[in-house]
Image: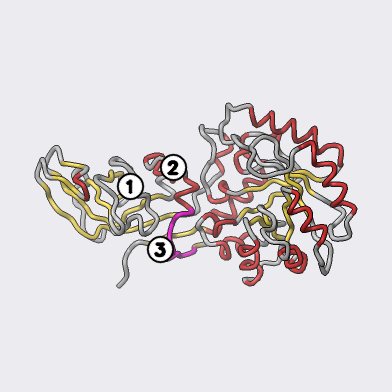
Amino acid sequence: MARPSHMVVDLAALISNYQWACKLAPKAQTMAIVKANAYGHGAVACATALQPYAPAFGVACIEEALALRAAGIHKPILLLEGTFTADEVAVAAEHDFWLMVEDPLQVDAVLTAHVSKPVKVWIKIDTGMHRLGLAPARVQGYYQQLVASPNTCEKIVFATHFASADETNNHFTLVQVQLFMDTAKRFKQHISLANSAAIMAWPQAHGDWNRAGFMLYGNSPLDANHPSSKGLQPVMQVNSAIMSLRLIAAGECVGYAQQWCAQRPSVIATVAIGYGDGYPRNADTGTPVLVNGKRAKVVGRVSMDMITIDVTDHGAVQIGDKVCLWGKDLNINEVAGHAGTIGYELMTRVTQRLPISYTH
């Protein structure tokens, strides 16, 4: 016996999505981003599945990279946030981690480190997001120091990150592209601009390296329908089951704070999943779920371990019937919209309480 809530991760869909990202930008090398436990899907399993295809992986920090190395991932791994302490440079060199450098302290850490072999460096340029990156006017000085150092490989990659590439009508992306190109072109090194949204919607941003993240997991980051989304297959499916059924009269209310009250005699199903599993607590009444493949709506407030749904119009429904919270037939972005958030957050907030099964 086991609680019915669980996650299914389709590794064949993951590989297909990676190949689709490559097809959208055939002249680039495509890095697979597996930070934040592969966006909640399991970094080791996802990187293992992608290792025969991807030339390199990207993670946020050295702890995530070391976990992949310990699991047998041997491809280069880029630390997207670079180092947090100076001693990480030597560890990066030892394990063939690539380092993003984005401020003077990180540059100094690379230049002064005692390394067993040169480390490959990516220089991040701040083109307008103003979160990380060297100011364009300061790039040349730091580049000259890094390229002359025996601690670094001769080949350096210049990178930036987009603020609004998911907004298909926001031309600030093109402003960022132009500023980046004006800054980086003089150095004749490889470049990397495109995240998932730019891979899909901004071909002007395709560089020598692209960084595919959210799209690998089968959902579009874009704010509008786009032809490039047709090749994506959802990888994560979160399932549970009905654990209780009750008939309530018109005027009776459901859940904490009596947020929802029935306007007619209603059949209410209680489902074994809640915010303790990562289901969003702020999902509003009307958030869709699938019961035996048919849409139903969340009613009342989400609890730690349970949600309640209205199945009045579903005919014969029984305890144990399957419930899908999001997956192949219910887009995670739609569910996220009802919770006032984005699909990225729902993916990454799923807790370890949910067991994961992997299919191929």
Separation of marks 3 and 2 at Cα, in angstroms: 21 Å
Snapshot quadrant of residue 79 = bottom right
The colour scheme is secondary structure
Q: Quadrant of residue 53?
A: bottom right
Q: Amino acid at mark 3?
A: Leu
Start and end of the magenta stretch?
348-358
Pointer 2: what residue?
341
- 238 is higher (above) or lower (below) than 67: above
Return the x and y of residue 242 as percentages of the image width and height.
25, 57
Count of marks, rendered view: 3
* Residue 66 visible in image: yes
- Mark in front: 1 vs 2: 2
Query: What secondary structure is marked by label 1?
Result: strand
Q: Tag 2 or tag 1, which sits nearer the N-term?
A: 1
Residue 329 percent across, percent down from the top left: 41, 46
Q: Earlier in the sequence, mark 1 or mark 3?
A: 1
Q: Are marks 3 and 2 in contact (CB under 8 Å)?
A: no
Q: Helix, strand or loop at disc 3?
A: loop
Q: Report the amino acid beneath label 2.
A: Thr
Secondary structure of residue under mark 2 = loop
* Disc marking residue 354: 3
Rendered position, 197 above or below 175: below
The label shown at residue 289 is: 1
Task: Name the amino acid, label 1.
Answer: Val
Residue located at (61% from left, 43% from top): 196
Q: From this viewpoint, is residue 26 visible?
A: no
Mark 3 surroundings within 10 Å by alpha-carbon count, few (fewer than 14), some (14 through 19), many (20 or more): many
Q: Which callout, 1 or 3, points to the residue nearer the camera?
A: 3
Give the image quarter of residue 158. Answer: top right
Whether the magenta-drawn stretch holds residue 223 is answered as no
Quarter of the image where the N terminus is located? bottom left
